[in-house]
Amino acid sequence: MIRTSYALNKILTAVARQHVMKERLTDDDLTGHDLSEEERAALKAGDITGLYHLGANPYLIRRVFRSRFSI
Amino acid sequence: MAEIVAALLTSHAPLITGRPEVSRPEQRDRLYGGFHELRRRLAAARPDLIVMFVNDHIQNFPYSNMPAFCIGLAAAYDAPSAGAARFMRIAPRKVQGAPEWGAALLERGLAAGFDFAYSYEIESWDELSVPLHFLLPEGLVPVMPVYTNCAAPPLPTPRRCHEVGAFVGAFARSRPATERIAFLATGGISHWVGTPETGRINPDFDRRVLDHVVRADIEPLIRLTHAEIERDGGNGGQEIRNWIALLGAVPGWKGEVLAYEPVPEWITGCATVWVHS
């Protein structure tokens, strides 16, 4: 079973729908979202591998942090 | 009884059209050639409806409400939308839907135990617009998409996808004899996208899938588990559910692989397949 974090996918969906790419999320982006400390840290660092292992959907990771991918 | 006039399987990926220049020319030429041959054959079959087996990439269906199978009842689809058009380098356009056909499928499904979700507004991405860019350049044939969850696990099993496809196929054949229906499934084959292995392709898996398709040997595909597909085909490989559904709609039909190229620059094992009786 693949790990899923609803909190991560909820915020990534919200950001993806703004149609802007991010290097990292800011405290402003995170306001109002109920995230664990690990999740907050990964989002603020733009840690695409960490986010994957924490249960973020890979399509959403790529949508938001496209510039972090080498390909 | 309506006639099934064509069945096609293709990959979809935004970079196929969005970044043609990064691929190797010989690979690009072979793959585009496969699309062009499919277009020629599809046009010759003169369909008046294309039923598409496709999947969302979380641009529509949110984690607050995730359908396993969803029938598109939109009057028209952005293929692509203005935003996606820039990225895929395809001119934005509308492709006509077939909401009455979809509603009839929906009601028949509910009566038969196939509890489809439905949607009157779908933002399409590469799953519709990239293959239709090649296959339906004039955009004159309406499309009726069936969306299957291939991107937000847990996913419907390949076996269930095959059953859904078989139901859609039987429904299509039950339509009036004047209808000429084509089936088009898009997605796959192997690709890892958005994961730590982004860019990986597994040609061995792709050739295995294609070999089963060519021989109409559906059972090994139906038996694939989510974990096996994830391991051998990547998260993008889960999209072969769309192919499996189409193969369910045309039982016994065999694939003819017009092109297969593992294109790392496009992050996808890309194929174009004509399926025939």
Image (spheres, coloured by chain):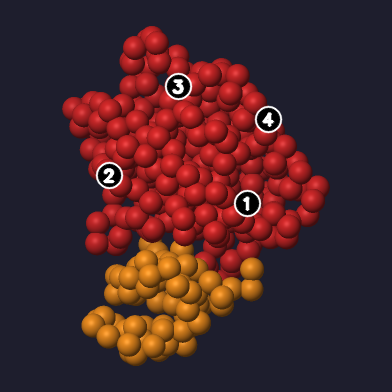
Is the C-beta separation of discs 3 and 4 under 8 Å? no
Q: CA distance from mark 1 to mark 2?
A: 27 Å
Residue type at the position of mark 4: Glu
| Chain letter for the residue marked with disc 4 in the picture | B
Q: CA distance from mark 3 to mark 4?
A: 19 Å
The residue depicted at 45 percent of the width and 17 percent of the height is B180
Q: Is residue B20 left or right of residue A29?
A: right
Disc 2 and disc 3 on one polypeptide chain: yes
Above or below, A40 relative to B14: below
Residue identified by numbered label 2? B119
Give the mark nearer the N terminus: 4 vs 1.
Answer: 1
Q: CA distance from mark 2 to mark 3?
A: 22 Å
- Shown in orange, the chain is A
Residue type at the position of mark 2: Ser
| Chain letter for the residue marked with disc 3 in the picture | B
Residue identified by numbered label 4? B37
Disc 2 and disc 4 on one polypeptide chain: yes
Residue identified by numbered label 3? B48
Checking the image for residue B61, the label placed there is none
Q: Is residue B217 visible to us here? A: no
Residue type at the position of mark 1: Thr
Give the mark nearer the N terminus: 2 vs 3.
Answer: 3
Give the mark nearer the N terminus: 2 vs 4.
Answer: 4
Checking the image for residue B17, the label placed there is 1
Is the C-beta separation of discs 3 and 1 under 8 Å? no
Q: CA distance from mark 4 to mark 1?
A: 17 Å
The residue depicted at 44 percent of the width and 77 percent of the height is A51
Above or below, B31 relative to A25: above
Residue type at the position of mark 3: Asp
